Amino acid sequence: MIIDSHCHSWAYWPYLPEVPDPETRGSVEMLLDQMDANGVDRATIVCAQIYRNTDNNDYVAAAVRRNPDRLEQFADVDSFWSETYHTPGAATRLEQAASRWPMKGFTHYIASNDDATWFDSPEGRAFFKVANDLSLIASIACGPQHQPMIRKVAERYPDLTILCHHMSGMRAYGDDATDKMELVLPSAKLPNIHLKLSGFHYVSPPESSWAFPYADVRWLYEEAYEAFGERMVWGSDYPVVTKAMTHKQALEAFRTYCDFVSEDDREAILGGTLERLLAKARPVSKG
């Protein structure tokens, strides 16, 4: 069983430069085609209501209902590009989202210049209490600097599953690479915090983000694996990843080239761990 923990799907391609096929480049049909071609059984679609896609939650929900055995939804709730970002009423908005869409979890993108102290504010605590009470998975786009606040959430709600996007923003380059890593790895002590083993192109220096199989950044994945073990979950970042590599390469960069991972843990990271987390998450009707 292979489950992609991090992919996207949009009705209209949201990035510049413009592409000649904006209405199909990021479509759910393209995602399913790549899953079929590369043996990926299921995928969790991380919604992002960006540029001409303010209805992305609706678009993905419809796709999930058409493909209930293949797709799961993590709805976009109050991410930094929204007008409601960290404004009063977040807990109510999360409840409303859960009642509207067949979502196993939600995604929340933190602004890079935000210290995330909102997470420990009364509004933030209420927001994550709803997530905990509804058994929603919290899929968080965060940087290393946000991990102390994420740990506070994890400690307050030990039953809340937290998935941190793309290695929590760690980088394998720069003078502060080790410092950033040391902000993230202590989170492994909290059993409800998980890392998405994804984003090889983000971890790499920009000038070599295409350099499959990413041997130069492997040390960072080894360090993270040593700390988190099977509490990592593979993700492709499709279709965004195609600016650097193919969907197949996003899979094989881990499956073939991260040969420091034990066979049992490889199976867990490729799908077993996420399958377990999805099974204990909020049951949804996809009818």
Image: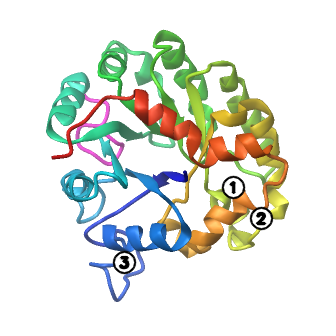
239 sits left or right of 58 in the view: right
State which region is magenta: 78-87
Which secondary structure lies at badge 2? Answer: loop
Q: Residue 76's x, y, as percent?
A: 31, 44
Q: Residue at x 43, y 22 (%)?
A: 119
The amino acid marked with disc number 3 is Arg
Which secondary structure lies at badge 3? Answer: loop
Picture quarter containing residue 27?
Answer: bottom left
The amino acid marked with disc number 1 is Val
Q: Residue at x 45, y 21 (%)?
A: 160
Q: Residue at x 36, y 43 (%)?
A: 80
Does any portion of residue 176 appear in the rendered image? no
- Whether tag 2 and tag 1 are in contact, CB under 8 A, the answer is yes
Instruction: Say above or below: 251 vs 212.
Output: above
The amino acid marked with disc number 2 is Tyr
Q: Earlier in the sequence, mark 3 or mark 2?
A: 3
* Viewer-closest of 235 and 80: 235
Q: Is residue 84 magenta?
A: yes
Query: Which residue is denoted by mark 3 in the rendering?
Result: 25
- Callout 3 crowding tier (Cα within 10 Å): few <14, some 14–19, many ≥20: many
Q: Earlier in the sequence, mark 1 or mark 3?
A: 3
Q: Earlier in the sequence, mark 2 or mark 1?
A: 1
Query: Which residue is denoted by mark 1 in the rendering?
Result: 203
